[in-house]
Image (cartoon, rainbow, N blue to C red):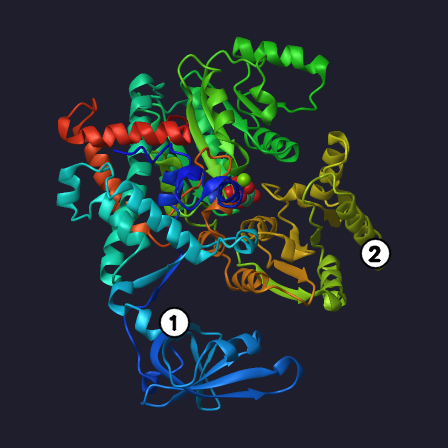
Amino acid sequence: MLDATTRDIKYLPGVGEQRASLLNRELKIYSLYDLLYYFPYKYVDRSRLFKVSEIDGRQPHIQLCGEIRSFEEMGEGASRRLVAHFTDGTGFVDLVWFKGIKFVKSKYKLGKRYVIFGKPTIFNSRANIAHPDIDDAETMQLSSMGLQPFYNTTERMKRSGLNSQAMAKLTSNLFSLIKGEMEETLSPYILQKYKLMPLHEALRVIHFPKNTDELRRAEYRLKFEELFYIQLGILHYSKERRHKYAGYSFTKVGDMFNRFYSENLPFELTGAQKRVVREIRRDVNRNIQMNRLVQGDVGSGKTLVALLAMLLAKDNGYQACMMAPTEILAEQHCSTLKRMLAGLPVRVELLTGSTKQKEREPLFASLLSGEIDILVSTHAVLEDNVNFARLGLVVIDEQHRFGVVQRAKMWTKSRIPPHVLVMTATPIPRTLAMTLYGDLEVSVIDELPPGRKPIATRHIFRNRITEVYSFIEKQLQAGRQAYIVYPLITESEKIDLKNLEEGYLQLCNRFCDYKIGKLHGKMKPKEKDAEMQRFSSGETRLLVSTTVIEVGVDVPNSTIMVIENAERFGLSQLHQLRGRVGRGGEQSYCFLVTGEKLSDDTRKRMEIMTGSNDGFEIAEADLKLRGPGDIEGTQQSGIAFDLKIASLSRDEQLLQYVRDIARAIVDDDPDCDKEHNRVLWRRLAEIKKRNNRHWGAIS
Ligand code: ADP
Ligand code: MG
């Protein structure tokens, strides 16, 4: 059997050095295998002939057989065109060319039978097909054509003649070469039980289907396999990991938890918070290391849940570490925790990149002696010289900013891996969470504290910004505060900073009666801190900022969020930013300011934002709009998003289905030595080797 995995694409008949380098560069096709798995993005039914009388303007593509009765040149300038009056005896359709008029006229003969193919439209009650494909009817074997595959190719490829048709030809050469021989990648019993097409057949059909029925079955088989191996991998490796590592057991709910609950808790927990705390308590009491993701929309009160979990650690004699993605957020968490824990003997300390050297030594010493109960930190905690006496719990806030590597690093800070609680307000759609985290348990805080009013969101064109300013003024007069956010893609982009400075100046002129703060990533940590402090205390009433305030910042008195250049933000980011307001009891407002010329995509994003306050809904929409590859967090997650056929947004049900199948296999064959699963385990190892996936670490 030919080893299609490794054989270089340049040896395929019809390829050669030059095309090979194009295929490498443009489509990352290096081997025969890569080509085999380069699937068409659409198909066009060429098995059926339509009649002209059937055209209703709604068919995507049709094929007709008939003759051209006459040519006619019409129009002037840009609308100059050649029209061929074509008929099959049931009516007339106009074939139209705007280019290559001379060539077309000389190539096609009146009265000769042709098969034409294209997209029909109806205009002034006449059917038209612009730039149709035309073939000689005698040389066409219609019945054998089936569905015609269309492959994505790039401009550069097309210029060298490597268009969709050429790709189809190469693929067909590939099938001749391997003569349909291909190693099956699923066990026979799985094929049988789930009624799946064998691999060799599915691959042939996916490229050259005879009909749509066959095509659906091939797609199903390939999607099944793709999602199945992702799930099998995640479940298998996470199980392996759990075998290897027991977890600490937090058996008691002790003094600190109870005292905090009865004496310090300023309000009643929401039902959802209570439920999630219960879920966490169950997890940490099982002798198995906890890996739990808490998803809760912005403002749902995740910090409090984290605090209760950290008190459980304390009550059982362990330390906890809370990691935040930015210094601002770490500082804020630290002061929030200190405030909430006032009067209780729980020691909370802060460690960030800007903690002074001379403060570090005593800090590190008390971490090591166990005197510090809770360390709030940024990435700074990952450094090798930071060590704990008994680290029992790691809370990672806004996890999409942390990668797998960082999480793995925290494990090394403890003899037994600590429990991990990951918190995110960028709710990852369920399908994606399952794929990314596999066995990570998911808790959802699906309830906001009482009294919150949905944030009124409006999309405003820049030329109407003065109306927004008048509105801000009223709110300021009523004692409220406002954020004005400017995009900053990378902290070094001067032009963005210029936008911010200009905006700041403009606002200072407009709101000369109020103190205005300014915050961006270029500032020294101390300055940032002081600026944030001034805003928190209400000394500054307007805060002009970059996205450094995106996550976590909590100033309940601010009721207005203005996002400048909103078109430059993704949906999740917009939602996060908007979440900075609406945190108190007052009605809050968000203005998305854009220019007037908008792409369809931006328009859609603005619609979604003005139409929904629900982070989950927005995340789903984001997934549909952008595809999973772009969702924050997927890059760092360790899974290269290389789904070739399945889609996380469209194939959610199938994903769930194969996940259950994979789980049953992992449970039934814990040592991976059952004969009937041999194919599966071997294939899994191959995939892992090829993709170098770190399933164990992420799940
Ligand atoms: P997030 O989930 O976005 O991290 P926070 O933990 O910052 O949300 O909480 C948002 C605000 O809601 C904070 O001011 C917090 O004190 C308050 N809060 C949290 N839980 C409750 C509750 N059960 N009832 C009332 N307010 C709450
Ligand atoms: Mg938070």
Q: Position of residue 598 (x, y in %)?
A: 63, 65
The residue at the point 42 percent across, 52 percent down is: 167
- Where 674 sits versus 486, above or below? above
- Where 159 sits versus 385, above or below? below
Number of labels in the image equals: 2
Q: Is residue 456 left or right of residue 409?
A: right
Query: Considering depth in this image, is 545 or 384 the residue closer to the camera?
Result: 384
Work out which quarter of the rendered image holds the N terminus and state it: top left
User: Under tag 2, what secondary structure?
Assistant: helix
User: Mark 2 — residue?
Assistant: 506
Q: Are marks 2 and 1 in contact (CB under 8 Å)?
A: no
Look at the image and tell me whether residue 262 can be seen.
no
Disc 2 residue type?
Answer: Gln
- Where 418 sits versus 122, above or below? above
User: Mark 1 — residue?
Assistant: 135
Query: Considering depth in this image, is 372 or 643 the residue closer to the camera?
Result: 643
Q: Is residue 480 left or right of residue 434?
A: right
Distance from disc 2 to disc 1, alpha carbons, whole Å, reads 65 Å
Say the numbered circle drawn on residue 57: none
Disc 1 residue type?
Answer: Asp
The residue at the point 18 percent across, 30 percent down is: 677
User: Under tag 1, what secondary structure?
Assistant: strand
Q: On the rendering, which quadrant does ligand 2 occupy?
A: top right
The residue at the point 68 percent across, 62 percent down is: 594
Q: Is residue 376 left or right of residue 187?
A: right
Q: Position of residue 484 (x, y in %)?
A: 71, 52
Tell me which numbered mark, 2 or 1, is placed earlier along the sequence.
1
Please rate how many residues cluster around mark 2, counting C-alpha atoms within 10 Å: few if below 14, some from 14 to 19, many from 20: few
